[in-house]
Amino acid sequence: MFRTRRTFRPLLTAALTFAVAPPLFGQARKPTLEQFMSPASPLELASARKADRIAWPVYDRGMRNVYSAAAPDFRPVRLTRFLEDNGVELSTVSISDDGSVVVFVRGVGPNDDGWVANPSHNPEGGEWAIWAVRTAPGSTAWRLARGGSPALSPDGRSVLYARDGQIYRARVTQAPATTPMDRGEEPFIEAWGTNSSPRWSPDGRKIAFVSNRNDHSFIGLYDVATRAVTYVSPSVDFDVSPTWSPDRSASPSFAGRE
């Protein structure tokens, strides 16, 4: 394996050199700084479970947008139109199982004093919100809710997010929200402690989350049908990072116990 990496690395370097700076070889024109600094940067990658489609955020000359590509040719298509270099971050991209919906976050969360970064000095305040866009041609991105770390449901119809220590839900639709819960005025899951990191089960029937109690934390398990919360192997330790197995297991595992 080590020998393979050593062989591959110079080949990759050579390929990038030709792709980025072709005028260096046999050309009279001198290379420019823009030639080396302007290539776009993909930042992360998400893939659909039941469709041959991927999505990713791209940083390109100060602009941040979401792209998608599908089989068989996987030609990149820009889904969003954020065409200003305004310093607003874009991250946490996820895609529904069928590849029809992409969810992402614009902006960064509040600091210790509750302030959200506002690099463009917008008098309305800084952006920290969950957005969605459909992968169908001609779709326009729209804002879902204020918050971050969204967990998109497997069917792409709703998204969970943590805010003020509780778990909230937003419907992934452009129609106006009609209930206090869908407007983000009431939590979807309200439990004792500071709750975060919601995770849908693969079949969408249960939700795992972390419930922090200051000197210990539990893995909560919410049943969508019965609206009941139970806790997985509760103890006086810190349980974190719930993860569902892909075989639709009834209970999640958790990555850490301290």
Image: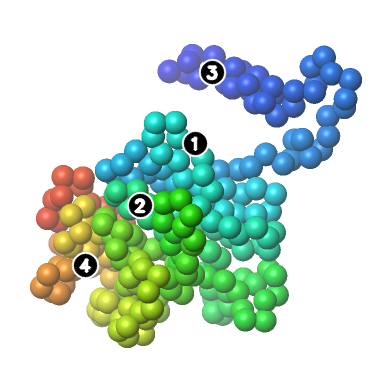
Q: Earlier in the sequence, mark 3 or mark 2?
A: 3
Location of the C terminus by quadrant is: bottom left
Which mark is on residue 75?
1
What amino acid is at disc 2? Ser
Please provide percent x and percent y for residue 104: 46, 59
Colour scheme:
rainbow
Left or right: 49 as drawn, with respect to 34: left
Proximity of marks 2 and 4: CB atoms separated by less than 8 Å: no
For label 3, the SS is: helix
Q: Residues within 10 Å of mark 2 (few under 14, many from 20)?
A: some
- Left-right relation of 45 to 6: left
* Residue located at (58% from left, 78% from top): 115
- In the rendered image, which residue does mark 4 sit on? 220
Mark 3 and mark 1 in contact? Answer it, CB < 8 Å: no
User: Spatial distance from mark 3 to mark 4, Cα to Cα?
Assistant: 45 Å
Q: Is residue 17 visible?
A: yes
Circle 4 residues within 10 Å: few <14, some 14–19, many ≥20: many
Nearest to the eye among marks 3 and 2: give it: 2
Q: Amino acid at mark 3?
A: Phe
Is tag 1's residue or tag 4's residue first in the polypeptide sequence?
A: 1
Q: Label 3: which residue?
A: 8
What's the residue type where badge 4 is placed? Answer: Gly
Mark 2 lies on residue: 100
Mark 3 or 4, closer to the camera: 3
Figure check: 125 above or below 37 = below
- Return the disc, 3 or 4, that comes first in the chain's sequence: 3
Question: What separation in Å lies between label 3 and label 1 (alpha carbons)?
Answer: 25 Å
Residue 231 % position (x, y)? 16, 67
Q: Quadrant of residue 156?
A: bottom left
Q: Secondary structure at mark 2?
A: loop
Of callouts 2 and 4, which one flags the residue occurring earlier in the amino acid sequence?
2
